Amino acid sequence: MQETRRAAGWAALRVLWAALAILGGALPGSPVLAAEREDDGLTEAVLDEIENTPLLRQIPASLKRIEAQKKAGGAAAVRHPVLPTDLEDAVAQKALWARRADGLLNECTEEEWLRLVPRQSPRGPSVTSPVKGFEKSNAWKWDPHKPDQIICAASGVTFPNPDYPVKYKRVKVLSGKTVDVPYYETHGGKGKTLVRARIDCEKTLYMTRALGMLARAYAATRDERYARRVAIALDAWADYYPDYFITLGQNGTEPINPEEGARTNFRVERASHYNGFGHEMTAAFVSIFDDIYDSEALQALSKERKRDVRAHIANDLYMNFVDYFRNYVPLPTLASTNLPGSVVSAACVGVMLNRLDVIQWVDSYKARRPITRWW
């Protein structure tokens, strides 16, 4: 009976992950990668292997390994990638993956690539236009070749724009720092719209898919050029991520201090581009780091920068995401929603980093919301 319930739970998770992959895809107006526009034999179904159900198919086996280590009183080293991603299919089509990855590398220099890394909290559908007469429009056009600009699709006005002065709200963030969050006034100064955060939303969605492509190409080909591009982007992302601000409620537009968030039991958004906790980090984003974890490029970057880049990415990006939930969001708040995607991602982080404490935290969540009720 227990095994039947467990199987049903993981089947539900697979359905959940398929839904999350769809919801986490490009928002309307987001361009596809230029490299994806070529008709080279890689179908959309193959591309979706980056961010679809195979990632979770074998997680139960991984959790059993973690549990066995926990009972043995320690954690052994693991060989990466450890998360299941149907790598055999990618290897079988490695020439096609390499062509895609080469096209992506050829599109921009490393300096241009780093401009695509989101530097602040992303926000999506809640971001409306500050242009008078178009304040209800949330349709935007963004071009990865002009990553710091965005166009209001309804009015044609490009931002930043000298006719629209940027204002700032100073707030504390969970790292302990204070940041200035840029915004535009709307409705005659009665509202705020976080257009810069919408730009970072576009960057987040673009880079999640682009890094997924490069990481999969690396796993299939072992071409260290692909791993390097992933590594420098994740290293930069880890620089910015701890200082992401929070906004009040789901799809909110008001940046607030952590103390204000605590008064709402942290019913807030941080790295999620919409709908609360569900999109703080996807499991597909976890698999990106898993694919390059043991790469020579990552080790070389550490030597080049004279610091442990892998530890920086692990601690200041992936574990920072997990610790946001463990240290700030009360379990009753998290378990009260029907959006367990971030808990699934946290489980993947625990498996990837072999962190028994993370798996134990996931277990405490499951005690409040049994796995068969996750979807």
Image (cartoon, rainbow, N blue to C red):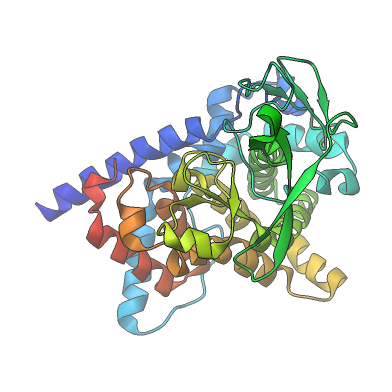
Q: Residue at x 32, y 43 (%)?
A: 338
Q: Residue at x 24, y 59 (%)?
A: 368
Task: Residue 185: give x, y in percent of width and height.
Answer: 71, 35
Task: Residue 211: give x, y in percent of width and height.
Answer: 68, 44
Residue 55 visible in image = no
Q: In the displayed structure, would residue 30 be above or below residue 231?
A: above
Residue 216 visible in image = yes
Q: Residue at x 47, y 39 (%)?
A: 275
> Relative to the observer, which residue lies in front, 122 or 193?
193
> Relative to the observer, which residue lies in front, 39 or 52?
52
Q: Quadrant of residue 63?
A: bottom left
Q: Quadrant of residue 27?
A: top right
> Relative to the observer, which residue lies in front, 236 or 38?
236
Task: Residue 207: give x, y in percent of width and height.
Answer: 69, 41
1 vs 205, left or right, is: left
Q: In the displayed structure, would residue 216 be above or below residue 141?
A: below
> Relative to the observer, which residue lies in front, 139 or 93?
139
Image quarter in which the C terminus is found: top left
Q: Residue at x 30, y 50 (%)?
A: 336
Q: How many labels were placed on the picture?
A: 0
195 vs 83, left or right, is: right
371 vs 239, left or right, is: left
Q: Residue furthest bottom?
A: 73
Q: Quadrant of residue 115?
A: top right
Task: Residue 94: give x, y in percent of width and height.
Answer: 66, 38
